[in-house]
Amino acid sequence: MKVVKNISLKNLNTFGVDVKSKYFVEIYSEEELKQALNSGEYSNHQKLILGGGSNILFTKDYDGLVIKNSIPGIKLLDEDSKKVIVEAGAGVIWDELVKYCVDYNFGGIENLSYIPGTVGAAPIQNIGAYGQELEEIFYELNGIYIDSCETKNFNKSECSFSYRSSIFKNELKNKFIITSVKLKLNKNPNVNLSYNSVKKEVEKKNIKQPTIKDIREIVIAIRKSKLPDPVEIGNAGSFFKNPVITKEKFKVLKEEYPDLKHFFVDENNVKIFAAWLIEKCGWKGKRFGDTGTHKLQPLVIVNYGNASGKEIYEISKMIKSDVKTIFYITLKNEVNIIN
Ligand SMILES: Cc1cc2nc3c(=O)[nH]c(=O)nc-3n(C[C@H](O)[C@H](O)[C@H](O)COP(=O)(O)OP(=O)(O)OC[C@H]3O[C@@H](n4cnc5c(N)ncnc54)[C@H](O)[C@@H]3O)c2cc1C
């Protein structure tokens, strides 16, 4: 374990924002993590755990210790005739875990293919895509409290998962570090075609009995066609969550905007597509200097080159303000802002 000083984080965040961290360490085991947390030299400094940096926006240099979690390892822990428990280290690349499971025909994870980032960050915002969320396959996780170095195991209900959220994004934000995650998967999987574009693609390809491998390939192809690749253009995926509003408020808006893109969450609540709101405010493809919204995906804020984190953050605030003024809806950030 080697702590380095004043390192640039440009290649460690998918926005490609060029900030420095006062101290930086990469850890490969729970023991190394404890060593980093216990080291006297850094005990008075703030600490930030970093995975793939694909859901984070640094608005300035980080005046503390950034701990890059690279704890490796995927293993099959337990199985019966129907289910299997797979455990992965928090530093494993999420999509490598998905590929491992799909290759063994362990189902329930395939719609989450190709989401960037690490396994350890997946529970933070209960990652979700194409009709599936992590919580549906989550079994439990292990980790360490930053202050006490005490280890703790969380079962599903203790994680308080909800739409792009969990206890780790709220009460335990920056207080707990996930070191491993266990998932419960199906050995005789049924494919999930609840998302229209996935279903349409299966039909278009005339696949009569789609396998989870087919679904993984379709999801990857859709993602590649729709989302900007951070290697080519800096971004962190959706910058905002889709807002949920009451049915009453929805009715009023729908009268004024008959094309309002939405879907019903339950009897009383409606989810509105944030991308639609942003586009209606005239923000699609709008650019200021080296930052702005993506030309095809207004929900994605991009770094065209050398934008600073502060500039990107300012754009996000302008978008929020316009959406609030026009629709009386407050957008919430999906990306973690480091101020
Ligand atoms: C092109 C693109 C597409 C995306 N699509 C999706 C999508 O479809 N669905 C979706 O849900 N997300 C999506 N995202 C967002 C992102 O990929 C996920 O949120 C991912 O889980 C972040 O993982 P990471 O390792 O990069 O986390 P980081 O960005 O490194 O960290 C995110 C937050 O989690 C904390 N954290 C990281 N690791 C740990 C740990 N081990 N213990 C405790 N805290 C930790 C960090 O401190 C930070 O607050 C997308 C991002 C991009 C760039």
Image: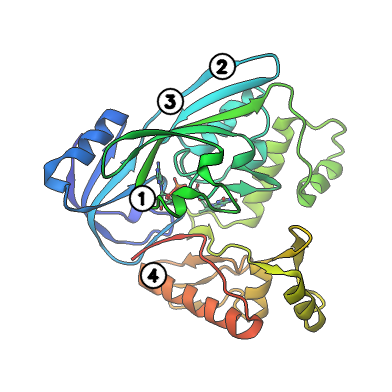
Task: Residue 275: tell me if it is visible.
Answer: yes
> From mark 4 to mark 1, how far is it between C-alphas?
16 Å
Tell which circle, 4 or 1, labels the residue nearer the N-terminal end.
1
Q: Is mark 3 within 8 Å of ligand 1?
A: no
Tell which circle, 2 or 3, labels the residue nearer the N-terminal end.
3
Say the numbered circle drawn on residue 307: 4
> From mark 2 to mark 4, how far is it between C-alphas?
47 Å
What amino acid is labelled 2 in the image? Asp
Nearest to viewer (mark 2 / mark 1): 2
Q: Residues within 10 Å of mark 2 (few under 14, many from 20)?
A: few
Nearest to viewer (mark 3 / mark 4): 3
Tell which circle, 3 or 1, labels the residue nearer the N-terminal end.
1
> From mark 2 to mark 3, how far is it between C-alphas?
16 Å
Q: Which residue is mark 3?
A: 73
Residue pictured at 67% horizontal, 41% vertical: 111
Q: Is mark 1 within 8 Å of ligand 1?
A: no
Q: Which residue is mark 1?
A: 12
Residue 80 percent location from the top left of the image: 65, 14
**As drawn, 66 above or below 268:** above
Q: Residues within 10 Å of mark 3 (few under 14, many from 20)?
A: few
Which secondary structure, mark 1? helix
Q: Which residue is mark 2?
A: 78
> From mark 2 to mark 1, how far is it between C-alphas?
34 Å
**As drawn, 147 above or below 6:** above
Residue 261 percent location from the top left of the image: 75, 68
Residue pictured at 61% horizontal, 21% vertical: 84
